[in-house]
Image (spheres, coloured by chain):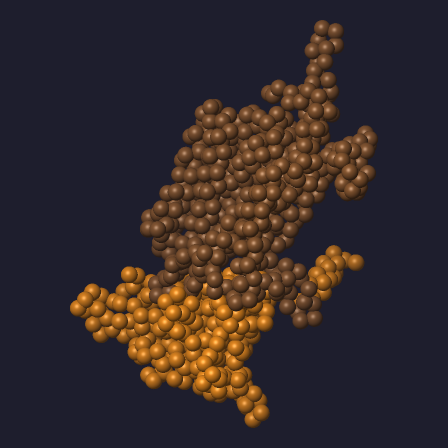
Chain colours: A orange, B brown
Amino acid sequence: MSNAAHESAARAAAVGALGQTIPTDAEVPPSDGTRWGMVIDLDRCTGCQACVVACQAENNIALNEEQRVLERRAKTWIRIERYWEGEFPNAKARFIPVLCQHCGNAPCETVCPVWATYHNPEGLNVQVYNRCIGTRFCANGCPYSVRYFNFWNPEWPESLNNQLNPDVTVRSKGIIEKCTFCVQRINRAQVDAKTDGREVADGEVQPACVQSCPTTALTFGDFNDEGSTVSRLAESERRYTLLENFGTDPGVVYLKKVDPHAEAPEGGHGHAPAEDRA
Amino acid sequence: MQEPVVSDTRTANRELLDFVFSWPKWFFAVGGALNGLLVAAVAVVILMLMFGLQFLGYSHPVYWGFLIVNFVFWIGVSHAGIMVSAILRLTQAEWRRPVTRAAEVLTIFSLLTAVQFPLIHSGRPWRTMYWTFPYDWNRGAWPNPRSPLVWDPSAIFTYLTSTILFVYVALLPDLALARDRAPNRISRAIYGVLALGFRGTTRQWRIQAIAGLLLSAIILPIFVSVHSIVSWDFAVTTVPGWHNTVFAPYFVIGAVHSGVSAVVTVMIVMRYAFGLKRFIKRDHIDSLARLLIVVATVWLFFFMLDLFFGLYGTEPAEVDTWQRRLVEPPWVVIAITFIICAYVIPVPMWLFRGVRRSFFWMFVTTILVNVGMWLERYMVVVPALERKSGLTFTYGDYAPSLSEFILVAASFALVILGFLTFAKLLPIMPAADIKEGQILADRIKVGRANVPAAMRE
């Protein structure tokens, strides 16, 4: 056997023994497939929290009672972060909706010991509840702090029983949960499109937050489809991604707020919250 | 460098096995108290299993705290056994002889305690087998080899297995001794089985010695790897303050610092509790204190490196973390306490011969070191999570709950109880090793010359 043949046989044996190949960064996300993503126009966001409520209802998120918020155990898959800019009386409230960024190079995925979180071929950062053992390593690794831990089994008052969404798993105690980009809606749209024998149209999939936004600050779509609304919006010169220095390649693109009273343009775009440190 | 410790083999055997065959009253009192603490901890764990982790002080975004700190601490203490035993054996340091067994046993029980913590700390401990054992063949979902939590069990269980082997090989002659002196048939039978038919023939001694030496050498790389891998639990993430290449050596040397200190503490307690005043002498703690001066100083150097690397990069998030650790209350109190306890008080004191040779002062300083090292781990782990990134809106503080204090206290109880139980059932002093040292130290007169009674091979 030649040396090269020997090597390839050895490699084949190694792959066979492992039973699977480990996806590398080069394989995920695929360049030709779908990459779901979101564009958030901060100039349109009024901080009304409609997205937060819609997400809560759509995804069977446990009730965030006052006590939960006070002990910082409230679960908000999408949250509106409020920052103050300037000094009184010229203080301005700045809002920024933060949800799972579905990073192409996610810090949470590498640290999960059981593949409970991984990158699916459509660019989603997926949380597999059944696999999760609750080490909370991913929640520590996430620079955006968008992963939430279930400290107990969720409970709803009897009157809300019919409000629960049958398409979404209710998460038990001891596992991590986070924004899924409403994967149940993506699946439904894909099934519908397949039944009709067509592709999923741009704008056909709308996560609950996008659907509920009164000012259409949130837009959802496929970044790999050059004609899609998100691709067009993401070309804006106001574009930035959150915490760019972490190199996470987020699937959520933010458009910087237009401030007519801004004194002078700062170098580059973005990093809005980082500069707002109190 | 030492005077011979034993003059008569028969007396030595009796004294070294004394605790195994006697039942002092304090044993039951201490054991009962420790068990009470353990029962409280078991109750907490059962509550956690039934109702989730709501009893712990965790909240968004600080998801690791006391329990992980305690895990790192006990892994650190476990490094003493190999540091003292393997390295000193390989370098043929004579003073190691009475120290080795205690250090190794401390290793075993602190490791066994340490591994409990990531387990009960996870949200669904009953599924934790997923990440320790690659078993889910059909589903294609293997453990994720990129995660340090998969490296951890491999390193720790390798270390645990090799340490147990190491102890057992060294224990064989002593087990045979216990078998020959057992007061009744049942204990004679048990020690007989455990001794694996050790009769003290030349061939058996040779095999036992070679096995001990080989294991010492093989264990050393594991010793370095274990705490390196534990440090990578933090270093491979992107959390500012954790993401640091110096973490592996910094953690290893910190582990040796706290581990060797723990060995000194344990030896001093053993000296009085087990009546081993003739075997554990001032020379021993003096030697260990000299070792500690070096270890502590190297550890301080690595701590400074960690700080320097953090500040030298001038990355805002990293500098923020260091500012929180060292300047902002309440962390400034912890930072000052830990550096004083782990270095500023003990090391200058150890420079004085009088302190090094005083059981009281060595007991106090080594306890201080471990208080300091526990706080050091706390300072490494928690502040970084409280201020993780630029999103100030998610900042949150961590406050440990009563449950966590109970669990931490119980971990100390578990280690002490394990150590006591071992000492009760098996010889905690390496009788054979001590007698070997005795023979090597003996001198006989040949004509006018005064020569060693035995030659080292």
Indicate whether B455 appears above or below B56. above
Residue B70 lies, in percent from the top left, at 51, 50
* Residue drawn at point x = 45 percent, y = 81 percent: A157
Q: Residue at x 48, y 87 (%)?
A: A162
Q: Nearer the viewer, residue B247 or B411?
A: B411
Q: Quadrant of the N terminus of chain A?
A: bottom right
Residue B238 in sight in this render: no
At horizontal 36% and vertical 46% (from top left) the residue drawn is B333
Q: Is residue B307 visible?
A: yes
Q: How many marks?
A: 0
Is B437 placed left or right of B340 in the picture? right
Q: Residue furthest front?
A: B25
Does A219 appear above or below B268?
below
- Is B332 displayed left or right of B43 in the figure? left
Coordinates of residue B402 in the picture (x, y in percent): 45, 56
- Residue at (37, 56) in percent of width and height: B317
**Which of the pair A174/A230 is nearer the observer?**
A174
| Residue B220 picture location, percent across and down | 63, 40
Q: Residue furthest left?
A: A89
- Toward the viewer: B102 or B44? B44
**Location of residue A99 by image quarter:** bottom left
Quadrant of the snapshot with the C terminus of chain A: bottom left
Q: Residue furthest bottom?
A: A196
Query: Which quadrant of the structure image shows residue A236?
Result: bottom left
Residue B419's place in the image compared with A47, above or below, is: above
x and y percentages locating residue B370 in the rendered image: 48, 41
